[in-house]
Amino acid sequence: MDQQDTAATGSRGVATFTVEIFIAVLIFAFGLTVLFGSRNLGSGWTSDGPGAGYFPFYIGLILCIASAGTIWQTMRAGRGDGEVFADGEQIKRVLTVLVPAGIYVAAIWVLGLYIASAIYIAGFMIILGKFSPLKSVVVALVFSALFFAMFEVWFKVPLYKGLMDPLRFLGY
Amino acid sequence: MNEISALLHGFSVILTPTNLLLMMVGITLGVLIGVLPGLGGANGVAILLPLTFSMSPTSAIIMLSCIYWGALFGGAITSILFNIPGEPWSVATTFDGYPMAQQGQAGAALTAAFTSSFIGALLAVIMITFLAPLVAKFALQFGPPEFFAVYLLTFCSFVGMGKGSPFKILASMGIGFALAAVGMDTVTGQLRLTFGIEELMRGFDFLIAVIGLFGIGEILLSMEEGLAFSGKSAKINPKVVFETWKQLPRYWMTSLRSALVGIWMGITPGGATPASFMSYGLAKKMSRDGAKFGTGQLEGVVAPETAAHAAGTSALLPMLALGIPGSPTAAVLLGGLLIWGLQPGPLLFVEQKDFVWGLIASMYLGNIAGLIVVLTTVPLFASILRIPFSIIAPIIVVICAIGAYTVHNAMLDVWLMLLFGLVGYIFKKLDYPLAPLVLALVLGDKAEDSFRQAMLVSQGDLSIMVSNPLVGTITGLALLLLVWPLISKALAKVRKPKAQQFAAEQPVD
């Protein structure tokens, strides 16, 4: 990446350095949680062998050491040429997938998998794919019906119908 | 020969119309998974695992392993036609495969890729046929310390052979182990690290992790790049196939070398991805046309494809013989074995002869079936890639959600899948390897059990890990691999540093 390029795309992004440190700190915190959690369980030697927390205790220790090492390595390398983890445009693109996916999972919880999936596929196609609403709805319904036939009818694996269970009338 | 008669018996087990049909279905699904972005061997098999619950173990493993072969074949299609590696191990295939397609030789490149894959897999299966029973027989003498030493070797070799920062490999592995420890303790029955959350009692299932890390993570990555497919069209007709086949024997040396590299990297948990890069690099160095590599050389397609397929296949050897998988996909297959009530490990060869030899026989047939399927259906699968990403992406998310839900019929798992997806995306961008995380999550409990049993035997004395030549050698080797990054750094300081071309590659498959 040359200088101009960095200046053009890198100005409004998140630096790799920042993300790197942030993630390493998170892992360190995770390691500490494991460490103390397993110490409470008894990480020592009990009358009938190693306690329940013996093994996880050292795993927690390894996590702390490894993340400290990563922080040290990152610090030593410094900010360097200001490498960018993801620029503004990329973050926007990732969020346009991640946020609807979160809403989709919440919708599964309420409406059940089949209906939520149909709405999700149609919505994704209309809003992000700029397809005509008719085409999108047809594709969404076809796929939901296909999944329904495959799981409920052919393989007899029931999927989640949701708190409201709107497909109750189908008898599955 | 014992193995040959056992293998023939294996063929008689699997040669039923149902199994052959499942084989074809598996291959087709596998190629589909290999072609679609976001679905790969590991999460593809994980998502389809619940569909096999009602089948007999033999039929189920045949279908799942055929999905795996199909995914290995499918990766080549996207690399050659679209310059997009569908799987990490087909990255090296793009170097010469895509230039060939640009010059209108897509058919030849595809034929070479599929045929080399087939040859690599075949050599690896032959190796498994004769070596796996021996390894299993040897492993029957193993006690808890030996098994723990083998686990230690598996994980240390990630650190020793991985290319990235050893701290990141350790961190990724530690997260896997820590997540594996959550839930009911298998020895004392205590609840561990659940922090009072009842839903965590079950622990974290690695299938959820696989679906999230590799499935959702991959979708996020593809989306970030703003995928726009612009592929070359493929015409494969018998004439192209036969003309390519006429050329291939010239590269027998490359094939053989790549297959050996692949087999070695597959047995040790190096994985298919570094194997394909390594054999591409070796071929470039040793070939007479080395300088022309990257401009569309047939040999440059042969080398990585042979190695990737050989590695992918030999990853099943430690899984079958020791119960220790060499790759995340092998780990998913191992998870399947556990679900069907089979205990993987050396005893499998004694107690479940039908199953083991049926599986090995299906590797032979599955690869032949795979070659036929891919050679005949390439245009069909290539056309799938012309479907816009904004249709494929939501459908893959839906498939992942279904896969995550069916593992335990729990909504929490679907949320966890999403979380793992985010983790997968960030980890991939920061070069944290994902394979050690998955393998640690799968093997965590078993490694811990063997460690605790060994400690019980020795009354807490760590010297049991070097108490006899066998366990001492394995432990020593493991520790050597663990400190290998330090040794190689010291060596590099002494010697003049060489230019590393593929240093950035990670074993992520």
Image: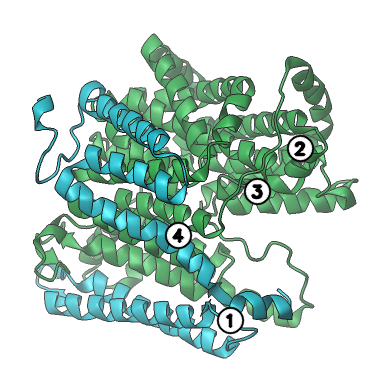
Establish whether labels 3 and 4 are both on one chain. Answer: yes
Gap between marks 4 and 1 measured at Cα: 30 Å
Asked whether residue B432 is in view, the answer is: no
Gap between marks 3 and 4 measured at Cα: 18 Å
Establish whether labels 2 and 1 are both on one chain. Answer: no
Q: Chain of mark 3?
A: B
Q: Is residue A80 above or below residue A5?
A: below
Mark whose residue sits in front, 3 or 2: 2
The mark that comes first in sequence, 2 or 4, is 2
Colour in which the image shows chain B: green
Question: Is residue B289 found left or right of B409 in the rendered image?
Answer: right
Gap between marks 3 and 2 measured at Cα: 20 Å
Question: On the image, numbered disc 3 is attached to which residue?
Answer: B276
**Residue B336 % position (x, y):** 31, 38
Establish whether labels 2 and 4 are both on one chain. Answer: yes
Question: On the image, numbered disc 4 is attached to which residue?
Answer: B434
Question: On the image, numbered disc 1 is attached to which residue?
Answer: A11
Question: On the image, numbered disc 2 is attached to which residue?
Answer: B101
Do callouts 2 and 4 mark residues in contact (Cβ within 8 Å)? no
Q: Secondary structure at mark 2?
A: helix
Colour in which the image shows chain A: cyan
The quarter holding residue B378 reads: top right
Q: Secondary structure at mark 4?
A: loop
User: Callout 2 environment at 10 Å: few (<14), some (14 to 19), or many (20+)?
Assistant: many
Q: Is residue B62 above or below residue B456?
A: above
